[in-house]
Amino acid sequence: MRSRPGEVLIRVLAAAGVAAATVFAGPGVRAVERPADTRVVAGEGGVQAATGAVGTGPVAGTGPVAGTGPVAGTGPVAGTGPVAGTGPVAGAGGAGAAEPTEPAGSREADRVLFRFEDERITESSGLAVSPTHEDVYYTHNDSEAGPVFFAVGGDGKTRAAFTLRGAAARDWEGMAVSRDPETGRGVLWFADIGDNFDGAWPDVSVYKVAEPASLKDAVLPAVRYRFRYEDGGHNAEGVMVDPRTGRLYIVTKEFAGAIYAAPKRLRTGRVNVLRKVGSAPIMATDAAYAPDGSSFVVRTYISATVYRDFDEQLARVPMPPLEQAESIAYTADGKALLTGSEGADSPVHLVPLPGRVLEAAAPAPTPVPERSGTARTEPAGTAEAAEDGGEDAGVPVSAVLLWLLVAFGATGAIVFVARRTR
């Protein structure tokens, strides 16, 4: 979203905290399968090599600490500078470690799938793949843009723009898709859940819209559901729907983030209560379920964490450096992630999921009966994948504590400078 005073301060403090997290991150924070040093990025001018997750800067790539991105310039954290080796966050083996560099093209790498060409799309904050239209992607702007969403083709060109009748766009922060179990028709969900003051609004809203069958500009009816959290107000940017149950979840964007479940049956005549069911990474900006419901992913400014279930992490997946990482979604086949950014002409990157993550996330096999009459279950994945599932993909407690100390110090410095410059 656009910078507001509170948000700017948070990003400045977060930048300092990221450096602390990088230094103190242990083996529990590591990349999965993909090297951090060499990546192929397909842009408009062809294919170019991008060295490192960030570049050659000491902490935040080539920009200053805050730069133009939300946290630590335009890249995740490490780059090839002196802090944390060459890995995206403390490398692949803990602080300072790094995986060997692979030649470009030796494996499928993340790439720019397309760029939003529509000049009206300036703050793409939500992203979803159409459940029924092939090679069509949905997005919407952040606040102050009206209740409008766009259907965009794989070439980046807008196919149609839709306005929700009777809806408001106070602070749209994310979207999700599902299917109607009875008709098979696509369903779109738009989350007006941003709250920069963590409780300024008495409730937040999510709009449910039947996916349009025809990709032509139109005004669509929407059903509004109002929500409140069981434990008070929160700022949130992530929304996802479990395709197996149809249940909606909201992921908060906070230092102590959490996942909240909506009631199984949503009601329009009263405020629905959101109940906490799991924890989320620090400052989560989006979330999405895999098409088969076998896993879900939570995006932060730095990376993405794949979960098998609530508080059951599979792995952290490095993300490409973006100006302001705001959105994430699974591809239709569930084998890769799509991630986008705010800004004009912003790119949508395709990031393949490592094979062992897909294997670990695969649904459990059907028990095979033994001849003796007892049932046995084939292992769901390799031992290596099981070890990944046991990792803590979050930030260590020591890093969080140091982060808070740095934040307080930075706040004091800001106050001191402000007083001196009166």
Image (cartoon, helix red, strand yellow):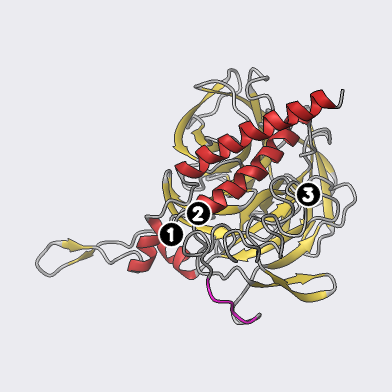
Q: Are marks 3 and 2 in contact (CB under 8 Å)?
A: no
Could you tell which of marks 1 and 2 lies nearer the N-terminus?
Answer: 2
Q: Are marks 3 and 1 in contact (CB under 8 Å)?
A: no
Q: Is residue 289 visible?
A: no
Mark 3 secondary-structure assignment? loop
Please, what is the three-letter code of the amino acid marked with disc 3?
Gly
Q: Is residue 314 magenta?
A: no
Label 3 packing within 10 angstroms: few (<14), some (14-19), many (20+): some
Residue 306 is labelled as 2
Residue 52 is labelled as none
Q: Residue furthest left?
A: 372
Q: Position of residue 362 (x, y in %)?
A: 42, 61
Q: Is residue 107 above or below residue 283?
A: below
Q: Are marks 1 and 2 in contact (CB under 8 Å)?
A: yes
Q: For mark 3, what is the residue?
A: 67
Disc 1 or disc 2, which is closer to the eye? 2
Q: For mark 1, what is the residue?
A: 361
Residue at (30, 61) in percent of width and height = 366
Q: Main secondary structure of the magenta part?
A: loop
**Observer-nearest of 13 and 225:** 13
**Observer-nearest of 234 and 268:** 234
Inter-mark Cα distance, 3 to 2: 28 Å
Q: Is residue 218 above or below residue 386?
A: above
**Magenta part of the chain:** 99-103
The answer to whether 142 appears left or right of 395 in the picture is: right
